[in-house]
Image (spheres, rainbow, N blue to C red):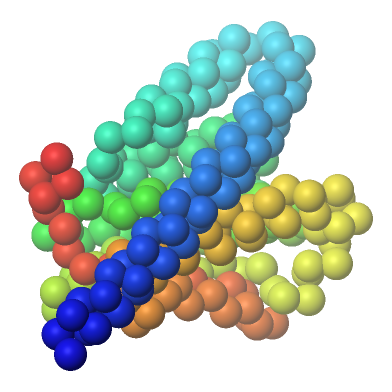
Amino acid sequence: KNKSKIRELENKLEIMIKKNNEIDSKLKIVTNTVNKFFILKVIDSISNLLLIEDRTILSEYISYLNEYLNYALDDSPKTIYKTIKAIESYFEIRKIEYGERLNYRIEVNEEVQNFIMPYRILIPYMYKLSVIGLSLGNKNYNISLDINKDGEDIKIVIKDNRSINDDKNVVVNGERKDISILDEHLKYLNEKMIIEFGKQYSTNYSESSNGTTVCIKFPIQKLQDKL
């Protein structure tokens, strides 16, 4: 009986490892594609900024971009604090591009800042929501981020003011390709979270006429646990 149970566990483990490797492979391909989209948008923005006589704006843009890329191109485990700094740089880039149309608010409990952000899962959600929200003509876009401790977990809540009825406008603005690849990216990241932490840590994503809400939870992990 014991041998049978051991073999059954070994088979389950082999299946889980195989699935995890498949997701890793797909995630790598999708991540590279998402990065290419981001870089292409950045190049287009820099080209437009070069036409402006005030070089201070371009200098600020490049500074924020450098800070964001330092985070994005480094594969080492990242703390919540470093992730937030990267998100702030990203939004400052977008504010230079979109001006007063973009408003963002970030609130992080100091108690959680040095814990790990698994799979950098926050960045793709912030990117997806802002790509959609800022592509909606001249409508102002508001997004908020709250990160707190919830027992032995970290709880992240993202909210924005984009109505589910706005989706059709995104297609008109030519953003559908971006969004589809981002959805694929988030799908694989969610699968990774479930494999590592369990089904109870599946990300909750909801859309309504009042806006979008994303709830992400994961167990507390310290940096030394990942080194």
Q: Give residue 187's position: percent from left, percent from top.
A: 56, 63
Residue 157 visible in the displayed image: no
* Outermost residue, right side: 172
Q: Is residue 187 above or below residue 203?
A: above
Q: Is residue 8 above or below residue 122?
A: below
Q: Give residue 216's position: percent from left, percent from top.
A: 39, 69
Instruction: Answer with left or right where residue 12 lies relative to residue 206.
Output: left
The image quadrant that residue 1 belongs to is bottom left
* Outermost residue, bottom side: 1
Foreground residue, 137 or 112? 112
* Outermost residue, left side: 224
The residue under the point 58% across, 16% down is: 58
Foreground residue, 144 or 12? 12
Q: Give residue 24's position: percent from left, percent from top.
A: 47, 49
The residue under the point 70% across, 74% down is: 163
The residue under the point 63% across, 12% down is: 54
Residue 37 visible in the displayed image: yes
Foreground residue, 202 or 204? 202
Q: Give residue 61's position: percent from left, percent from top.
A: 54, 23
The image quadrant that residue 45 belongs to is top right
Q: Is residue 217 above or below residue 188?
A: below
